[in-house]
Image (cartoon, rainbow, N blue to C red):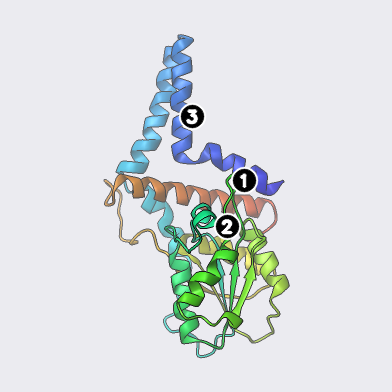
């Protein structure tokens, strides 16, 4: 139920969908001759789109998330395992065409391959099923072996989990299939903006991991003002940040994490 509710909520809360819905509501209000209310809904829609596309709001929202957990200055001398969270593949495309088409979060798997080449003795856990409610796609845990083995990762090092639908299940199912022993070093790879929520969930699951963020979306040097990126990426940054902050709050309220914003 949590999974379904989260998807339904985000459909309406996603900034672009939110603006479109309010623009549609504006049209209906004009038909009903509620002009003042129509002006208010139109203003809200344009405000969301304008702030998201033409200002640095998205970057300013995402920076605290990306800066929360820093990548270690040096790779640990011994790495027992590498966990990479799904979300980096174009599941719908790969289901039909095969291959391993990457999306904007594909850096997660590139980083995993690099680390696996540096530590060939480490197990590589890929956790991620189909996280969509309606669209069909190939699970990242199914696609990943084709890419990672092509990049030189030994097949016998791979541990695949393709049933999880969200980050909570990523942590829970990974804990169940991995026999991590005290004193071992396990790296967790996910997008930098997603790391706070991921760390909170893995801690709650009792799995001690070392954060290894990838896939940064902002430089961290942005200040209040006009967007320094193209409108599409600026709006996407606002959407990503809004989703992560909402996710942090939802998981904390549901008791799935101990802290609203997990600390290093």
Rendered location of residue 225, percent (x, y): 27, 47
Q: CA distance from mark 3 to mark 2?
A: 30 Å
Q: Position of residue 13 (x, y in %)?
A: 52, 39
Circle number at residue 138 = 2
- Contact, CB < 8 Å: mark 1 with mark 2? no
Q: Position of residue 228 (x, y in %)?
A: 26, 52
First in sequence: mark 3 vs mark 1: 3
Crowding at mark 1 (Cα within 10 Å: few <14, some 14-19, many 20+): few
Say few, some or many: other residues with alpha carbon within 10 Å of mark 2 (under 14 / 14 to 19 / 20 or more). Answer: many
Could you tell me how far apart the alpha carbons at marks 1 and 2 are, in whole angstroms? 13 Å
> Relative to residue 46, is residue 57 depicted above or below?
below
Label 3 secondary element? helix
Residue bearing the label numbered 1? 133
Q: Judging from the image, what secondary structure is the residue with disc 1 in? A: loop
Structural crowding at the residue carrying mark 3, measured as other residues with C-alpha within 10 Å and reported as few (<14), some (14–19) or many (≥20):
some
Whole-percent x, y for residue 136 in the image: 59, 49
Which callout, 1 or 2, points at the residue further toward the start of the chain?
Answer: 1
Query: Residues at badges 3 and 2 in contact (C-beta under 8 Å)?
Result: no
Q: Residue furthest bottom?
A: 77
* Foreground pick, 72 / 138: 138
Q: Image check: 107 left or right of 234?
A: right
Residue 8: quadrant of the picture: top right
Residue 257 visible somewhere in the drawing: no
């Amino acid at each position: 139920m949590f999974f379904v509710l989260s998807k339904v909520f985000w459909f309406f809360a996603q900034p672009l969908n939110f603006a479109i819905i309010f623009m549609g509501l504006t049209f209906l209000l004009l038909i009903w001759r509620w002009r003042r209310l129509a002006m208010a809904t139109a203003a809200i829609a344009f405000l969301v789109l304008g702030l998201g596309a033409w200002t640095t709001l998205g970057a300013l929202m995402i920076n605290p998330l990306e800066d929360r957990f820093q990548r270690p200055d040096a790779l640990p001398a011994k790495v027992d395992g590498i966990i990479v969270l799904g979300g980096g593949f174009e599941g719908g495309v790969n289901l039909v065409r095969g291959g391993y088409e990457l999306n904007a979060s594909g850096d997660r798997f590139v980083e995993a391959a690099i680390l696996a080449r540096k530590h060939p003795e480490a197990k590589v856990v890929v956790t991620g099923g189909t996280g969509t409610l309606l669209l069909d796609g190939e699970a990242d845990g199914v696609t990943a072996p084709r890419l990672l083995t092509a990049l030189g990762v030994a097949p016998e090092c791979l541990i695949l989990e393709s049933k999880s639908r969200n980050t909570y299940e990523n942590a829970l199912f990974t804990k169940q299939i991995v026999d991590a022993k005290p004193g071992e070093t396990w790296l967790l790879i996910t997008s930098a903006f997603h790391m706070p929520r991921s760390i909170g969930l893995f801690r709650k699951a009792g799995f001690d991991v070392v954060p290894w963020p990838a896939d940064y979306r902002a430089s961290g040097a942005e200040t209040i003002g006009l967007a320094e990126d193209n409108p599409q990426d600026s709006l996407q940054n606002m959407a990503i940040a809004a989703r992560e902050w909402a996710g942090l709050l939802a998981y904390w309220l549901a008791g799935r994490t101990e802290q609203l914003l997990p600390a290093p």
